[in-house]
Image (spheres, coloured by chain):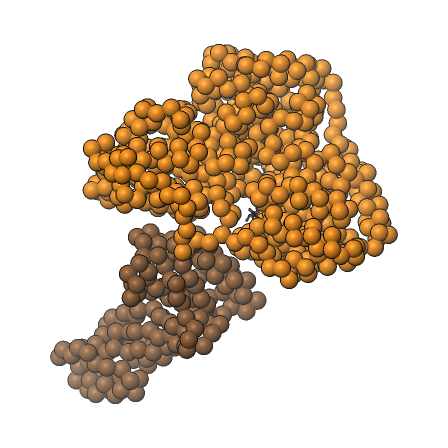
Chain colours: A orange, B brown
Amino acid sequence: MELSGGEIIIRSLQDEGVEYVFGYPGGAVLHIYDAIFRQQQVQHILVRHEQGATHMADGYARATGKPGVVLVTSGPGATNAITGIATAHLDSIPMVIITGQVTSKFIGTDAFQEVDAIGCTRPCVKHNFMVKNVEEIATVIKKAFYVATTGRPGPVVVDIPKDFTAPNVKIPYEYPKDISMRSYAPVSGGHVGQVRKAVELLAQAKQPMIYSGGGVLMSESHEELRQLVRELGYPITNTLMGLGAYPATDKQFIGMLGMHGTYEANMAMHNCDVLLAVGVRFDDRVTGEIEHFCPNAKIIHVDIDPTSIAKNVDVDVPIVGDLKVVLKRMLELLAEDSRRANPEDIAAWWQQIEEWRGIKSLAYEYSDEVIKPQYVVQKLCEVTNGDAYVTSDVGQHQMWAAQYYDFNEPRRWINSGGLGTMGFGLPAALGVKLAFPDADVACVTGEASIQMCLQELSTAMQYGLPVKIVNLNNRYLGMVRQWQEFQYEGRYSNSYVDALPDFVKLAESYNHVGMIIEKPADVEGALREAFSMKDKLVFLDFQTDDSENVYPMIEAGKGHHQMRLHPKTGALN
Amino acid sequence: MAVSKHVISLLLENESGALSRVAGLFSMRGYNIESLTVAPTNDPTLSRTTLVTSGDDRTIEQITKQLNKLVDVVRLVDLTETSHVAYELMMIKVRAAGPQREEVKRLADIYKGKVVDVTESTFIIELTGNSEKLDSFVKTVGDEQILEVVRSGATGIARGERGLKV
Ligand SMILES: Cc1cc2nc3c(=O)[nH]c(=O)nc-3n(C[C@H](O)[C@H](O)[C@H](O)COP(=O)(O)OP(=O)(O)OC[C@H]3O[C@@H](n4cnc5c(N)ncnc54)[C@H](O)[C@@H]3O)c2cc1C
Ligand SMILES: Cc1ncc(C[n+]2csc(CCOP(=O)(O)OP(=O)(O)O)c2C)c(N)n1
Ligand SMILES: [Mg+2]
């Protein structure tokens, strides 16, 4: 079979099993768009801004585990995609982004819509490829998917000059079955001796703690993790990226840790003597001031990426390996060897943890006059039976969604943790809804974040994607305002969101449904009504308390044991 | 932690973007880079890089891990950890007029340097050796006399059977 470069690209995507390509056309990719037009298998989703395309593909990837695919034109198409590429990069999300490039002989001449996409994206991709001829297109696409999805996943950019996609040059097509690259070999199993050492250390612990994160979702090893946690009977905390890996409603789960983690999770971190860290990267939002981090703990760290290990914190038992393989091995070793920690020690440790839990660090003051944002999230969780896919933007609302929605399954909580990209929530929700049309999909957002990719309401209209937008509208860049309240004596420099649109009318103008909710008593009813409208996108504009803050909080320079609790409900204050 | 100097040797895919990935890593992550040399090898698909960097143990560990993670890096060795040879080439153009001529020539001889170009008023001296030796020569000749200095940066190779192969 002889195909042109443009056709080869689309055939390769078909052979890769790609369902959706999120993209936006332009001069450099017109041949590719023509190939899209002449087939049915890969569906193209036309976005309204290339950033939206990247977040949609990203949301799709986070919810399904499959790579998200993006197609954009050269120049501004590529630069508009960069925020979304960087977002995926920092959270290790598999994506393949195809960028058009100017005709090869014009490269380097400041040609129309020329930008060095390889150079621009290099710092925020796992890898990128410049295609050098028509013959290598299929192999490069195969490599791109291979690199994006194996080892520690990440986004891969493929930059293709327009002339290599032209219809007049046709060559035989064959999609490579396997690929191997001498310079890229993702690791699998962990060092057997190290795994044994880890299990022995765990069995000697008096005050053990398990700290797990996004790597559990990436390696699909939540079942193994759950078994291990139950077998050991130890407390577990999740990072913002790991929520759902272990069920939030289980007794052994003691909440998220870190800057806005629970009192019990952070105190258990501070006081533990053995820490098992799995699929986490000791981010600064998690560790607080490194000097105070887990002062008495022996640390075991399992990660597939050696650079994650001993980057920020020294570890005692480093294990480089695929988490799924390592956790299985740990379970086998525990089955072979019945030695366990002293039950009295563990009981005493749990008693201490229960005391900390008794502080109820997530308690807030309910009001029947003004809507508390935490209350909206709690009701959202109730109304959707804790079973919805929840995407989020960045700010206070993101933290409240993480704290008050009980995620019991992995891949249900979808947010930008590493880059913290406002504008992520709505397009990500649309990507999720495409993947799971029958599931409830909610986007918990703020009135500022939602405006950063608001144009995608139009994409939702075109493809009929009935997600529910839960706008926690506090008329502030709330997270910024909170920091200004705490650290700048309430000088609210540019954190007030003035001139807000009428979100109800705005939603209606796209033929969506809009609702404004002003009273706490109406919160639950509005949510129920919205979720009963199965085929309508509903924009719920909740007018929330404008002075609410996120607690607990570890402020700059502080350790896990130095949390700032709610001024009214925090028992320690 | 104490800062020490490391000579790291890499085999890179001989691709156009490979070198910028290596250089970009150093600027992006704020690592020191003292010198970097690259040239093709007997295998035209590979190029060999020697880079000299410095940092404490944790930084050096991160540097080698991060380099290894680059998809275009095929093999890596920290030569500082094995017995190795590392040399640098310098060409230095110095003032050599009148009575200075003899003096400069004598200095070059002491350092086993070679005069490779002569004009009425200048010499170009070629000198190979470890970086400290070259530093010392530059210092001894002195800024007054020096017109131009060009150094290759260190290139290194492990002794014996050990080495970087695909
Ligand atoms: C406003 C704001 C506030 C925040 N506050 C908090 C907070 O309070 N608490 C918090 O936790 N976070 C918080 N974050 C998020 C934080 O910035 C980081 O994104 C997050 O902590 C990182 O999560 P993680 O450690 O699970 O790592 P991830 O980024 O999910 O990385 C996963 C790790 O797993 C490894 N891995 C991948 N695949 C495998 C495999 N197969 N086997 C083994 N390992 C694998 C990777 O190499 C990587 O090291 C906040 C973010 C924002 C925007
Ligand atoms: C693209 C981008 N710009 C700026 C920021 C910094 N930032 C973090 S939270 C925030 C305010 C978000 O306001 P809103 O969406 O209303 O959420 P709230 O905190 O009020 O819940 C800002 C500006 C960011 N994270 N992303
Ligand atoms: Mg707000």
Q: Residue A359 appears at what percent x and percent y?
A: 80, 38
Examine the image and state in which quarter residue A385 appears. top right
- The quadrant in which the C terminus of chain A is found is top right
- The quadrant in which the N terminus of chain A is found is top left
Q: Is residue A3 above or below residue A235?
A: above
Is residue A387 in view from this perspective?
A: yes
* Location of ligand 1 given as a quarter of the image: top right
Q: Is residue A41 left or right of residue A539?
A: left
Examine the image and state in which quarter residue A5 appears. top left
Q: Is residue A315 above or below residue A238?
A: below
Residue at the image position 49 percent from the left and 58 percent from the top: B65
How many marks overall?
Answer: 0
In the foreground, A485 or A386: A386
Q: Is residue B151 left or right of residue A495?
A: left
Q: Residue A343 appears at what percent x and percent y?
A: 84, 51
Examine the image and state in which quarter residue B120 appears. bottom left
Residue at the image position 41 percent from the left and 55 percent from the top: A183
Q: Residue A228 appears at what percent x and percent y?
A: 71, 47
In the foreground, A268 or B78: B78
Residue at the image position 79 percent from the left and 57 percent from the top: A339
Q: Residue A402 appears at what percent x and percent y?
A: 64, 34
Q: Is residue B141 left or right of residue A123?
A: left
Furthest-left residue in view?
Answer: B120
Is residue A372 in view from this perspective?
A: no
Q: Is residue A301 left or right of residue B73?
A: right
Furthest-right residue in view?
Answer: A344
In the foreground, A482 or A272: A272
Residue at the image position 75 percent from the left and 44 percent from the top: A230
